[in-house]
Image (cartoon, rainbow, N blue to C red):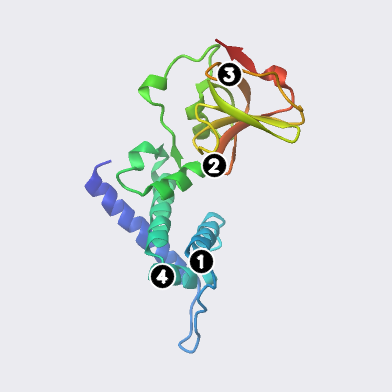
Amino acid sequence: MGMKKWAGLKQVAVIALLALLAGCTSYGSDQVRAEPAASCTDTLSTVLHRVKTDDTAGAINAELDWLSSNCSSEYNVFVDYASGKGAAEQFGVDTCESLSDRFGPRAIELLRADGLCEVGVAPAEAVQQPGGGIAWNEAAAHAGTVQRVCGPLAGGGNSYDDVFLNLGRDYPDPARFQIVVWDVGSLESIAGGLTLCTSGRITLFEGVAQIELYDPSFIEIYE
């Protein structure tokens, strides 16, 4: 999609969204909109949640007015997210990398976490997986589906009896893929860099793609 055409679509998407929001609630001349008693970050989180849950009547109008007047950076994140969401719903999901010249990194991460853009595979990492399946950095784009995922072990840790194995990138990088093994106590040490594969339904937790297991025998290890 050309940049000129995209700019026009972005403007239309934003105008349409703001017009929809403005039309949801009418205010009389004697009514005063209460400004949100919250930080810029909190208000951004609130308006994003309202858009995601279609709660676009009433308070969101005042919140957006306050955000645009007091928090230009957060307001731009909202506009970018709303534009990307509208474009994805109308034209289909694009790769997150292709959005970098249109939107800021915070908005792209939000779009990725919501499955509104796909994480592409770098050429060097687009290799055949042992036994088939997809690479660790493709997993987020397949959230909600059952897949076999492989990747190099980058790190791991324990939380009580639960074990977390991070593939591709280590914690706290949100682009990592993690295998969560619940109630296992501990696992034998696995050398970093070895390729791990497992199968299951991919879910997203705070934007991180993962497969949850209760049986560590479902983890395959390759040299």
The first of marks 2 and 1 along the sequence is 1
Numbered disc 1: secondary structure: loop
The first of marks 2 and 3 along the sequence is 3
C-alpha span from label 2 to label 1: 23 Å
Numbered disc 2: secondary structure: loop
Label 4: how many Cα within 10 Å (few below 14, some 14–19, many 20+): few
Residue under label 1: 39
Please give left or right for residue 214 compared with residue 9 in the image.
right
Residue at 43%, 16% in the rendered image: 127
Residue under label 3: 196
User: Residue 184 location, x and y as percent?
Assistant: 76, 27
Amino acid bearing label 4: Asn
Mark 4 and 2 residues: CB-CB less than 8 Å, in contact? Answer: no
Amino acid bearing label 3: Leu
Residue at 55%, 16% in the rendered image: 194
Mark 2 and 3 residues: CB-CB less than 8 Å, in contact? Answer: no
- Residue sitting nearer the eye, 77 or 176: 176
Mark 4 vs mark 2: in front: 4
Amino acid bearing label 1: Ser
User: Residue 173 location, x and y as percent?
Assistant: 50, 37
Mark 4 and 1 residues: CB-CB less than 8 Å, in contact? Answer: no
Tell me the tag on residue 172.
Answer: none
The first of marks 4 and 2 along the sequence is 4
Looking at the picture, does residue 108 appear above or below residue 33? above
Residue under label 4: 70
C-alpha span from label 4 to label 2: 28 Å
